[in-house]
Image: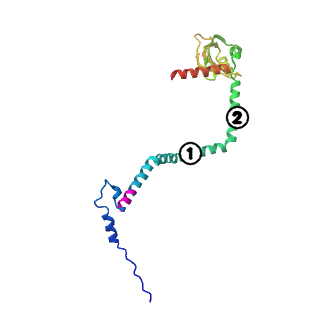
Amino acid sequence: MATSKSIPKFDVNAWFADFASQFKDLNFKEPGQWPWAPKLASALVVMLVVVGAGYVVLLQDEQDRLEAEHNREPQLREDFRNKLGQAVNLPELRKQKSQVEEYVTQLEKQLPGKAEIDSLLSDISSAGVGRGLQFELFRPGQILVKDYYAELPIALRVSGRYHDIGAFAADVSNLSRIVTLHNLVVVAPAAPNSPLSMEATARTYRYLDPTEVAEQRKAAAKAAGGKK
């Protein structure tokens, strides 16, 4: 008859007692002579310290960058939606751009060039004479140069009948070139049956030629550099 061998029992209490006893009376000056349990515990502590320091030193910056990129996601999504809408509407936007460019070209045609200013001044004078008005003052002022155009003010003083003065103002506004009237003052006659007198500033505009535009940009750049 076969005899059954008894399985040795593991005494947990004895094992814990032996494990804890290995941490008593340790000589920290000679860790190499420590029992296996303190050595293993020390190795685990050192490993955890190294892993924690490595995370702080090596991974924290990457974590901050990742969080910053994550925070940018809503703005990037919004930009994407806006650009997608522009891409969908690109044919219509191009059509609108073409219409605006055509409109600007038409406006430029209404602005006289440098060589046409004299003829325009003559047209204004002829409009007044044609209505039977008497010019008491017709004095072009100093040309004011803007970014892409120049403005020429003209001081006017004419005398005549009320309806003729009104017709003259209408004729000026209907000239093929852009002319505007500003600061209109109508003075009543000092004596009966005397003509009315109107003072105004007529402003006409001309476009700048490429050379003048280049000079304006150069002057603006120089002024901006001087401010720095």
Image position of 29 (left or right of 228): left
Q: Are marks 2 and 1 in contact (CB under 8 Å)?
A: no
Image position of 59 (left or right of 29): right
The residue beneath circle 2 is 98
Residue occupying the point 39% across, 54% down = 46
Q: Please state which of residues 93 and 18 is positioned toward the viewer in this rendering.
A: 18
Whether 114 is drawn above or below 67: the answer is: above
- Dot placed on the residue nearer the N-terminal end, 2 or 1: 1
Image position of 219 (left or right of 20): right
Magenta-highlighted residues: 37-43
Q: Is residue 123 visible?
A: no
Q: Is residue 85 visible?
A: yes
Q: Please state which of residues 41 and 94 is positioned toward the viewer in this rendering.
A: 41
**Residue 160, image quadrant:** top right
Residue 19 in the magenta stretch? The answer is no
Q: Please state which of residues 53 and 207 is positioned toward the viewer in this rendering.
A: 53
Image position of 102 (left or right of 198): right
